[in-house]
Image (spheres, helix red, strand yellow):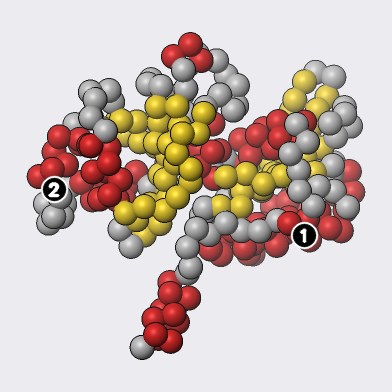
Amino acid sequence: MNEASILLALETTGKSGSVAILRTTHAGIVCETEVLEADVGSAKTLAPAIDRLLRRLAIDVTDLSAIALLTGPGSFTGLRVGVATAKAMAYALKIPAIELDTLDVIASQMTPNHPAIHVVLDAYRGQVFYAGYRISPSQLEKCSIQRFEKISPTQIVNIEHLLVEMLAAGGEEAIELCGPGCDRIRKFVGDPENACFERLVEVVHRIRWNEGPAMFPLAESVAKMGFEKFLAGDILDSFHILPQYYRSSAAEELAGKSKLG
């Protein structure tokens, strides 16, 4: 990436989202963001947000060198909107795309007190999207975006199964949970109606609930991680960008059950 390079980043994995533009200058890396309007939906707000940001920075869309985006997990609608927008722009501008995992981006935003973190995103139906990360104690104070080693791949798991696995792992170190799925897990462990409620008492006191804006993926982080992947040549042709859902939608699952019936 040379001094004139400009990278656009999209984050549309939730109900709302954000966009960012990263530029390399003589003074270093500069990143500016624009937040999508809340409670409207990215299908209507993404394109206007991109346009506002480009205008604010006096950048022509043809000056873009690459587009970074989150391809999942996340909202089915949000992922489709982000992917469709990135595909169309990358194809029209003849520029590459950089895809990123939502949970990887959230992990990059964390400042943990312990060498292991568990990132969760609400998948509903008693499930979460989950990935585990570890960092060596000597790296805890460093600021590299990709300082974590991913020790468990992004997957969809039942909340009960995840917590029981954490319990079975033993140990006394704190279990750092972060991400938008924390609220769902907090409700689960606080519900005495759950069959495994008594077994969870042992693990609940070890959970450290992370809070704050960093629990949600930010377009600025997408831009910075995308920048590092772009420098490494980890890019995609626009035709190869696909949303990663990790499961069928509720409507598709219902349709499948209807066929079996």
Mark 1 residue type: Phe
- The residue closer to the viewer here, 105 or 50, is 105
Answer with the quarter of the image where residue 221 lies.
Answer: top right
Q: Which residue is mark 2?
A: 197
Residue 247 x, y percent position in the rendering? 47, 63
Q: In the rendered image, which quarter contains the C terminus?
A: bottom left
Q: Earlier in the sequence, mark 1 or mark 2?
A: 2
Residue 257 visible in this rendered orientation of the protein: yes
Residue drawn at point x = 46 percent, y = 34 percent = 151
**Relative to 106, residue 155 above or below:** below
How far apart in space, not on screen, are marks 1 and 2 (Cα)? 47 Å
- The residue closer to the viewer here, 219 or 57, is 219
Decide: few, some or many residues near mark 2? Use Cα within 10 Å; few <14, some 14-19, many ≥20.
some
Residue drawn at point x = 70 percent, y = 62 percent = 84
Picture disc at residue 239: 1
- The residue closer to the viewer here, 199 or 95, is 199
Residue drawn at point x = 46 percent, y = 17 percent = 136
- Left or right: residue 55 versus residue 40 is right
Mark 2 residue type: Phe
Q: Pointer 1 and pointer 2: residues touching (CB < 8 Å)? A: no
Q: In the rendered image, which quarter contains the N terminus?
A: top right
Residue 75 x, y percent position in the rendering? 51, 59
- The residue closer to the viewer here, 186 or 154, is 154
Tag 1, which secondary structure? helix
Residue 48 visible in this rendered orientation of the protein: no
- Left or right: residue 66 versus residue 243 is right
Residue 64 x, y percent position in the rendering? 84, 44
Residue 21 x, y percent position in the rendering? 74, 39
Tag 2, which secondary structure? helix
Residue drawn at point x = 25 percent, y = 50 percent = 160
Picture disc at residue 196: none
Answer with the quarter of the image where residue 254 lies.
Answer: bottom left
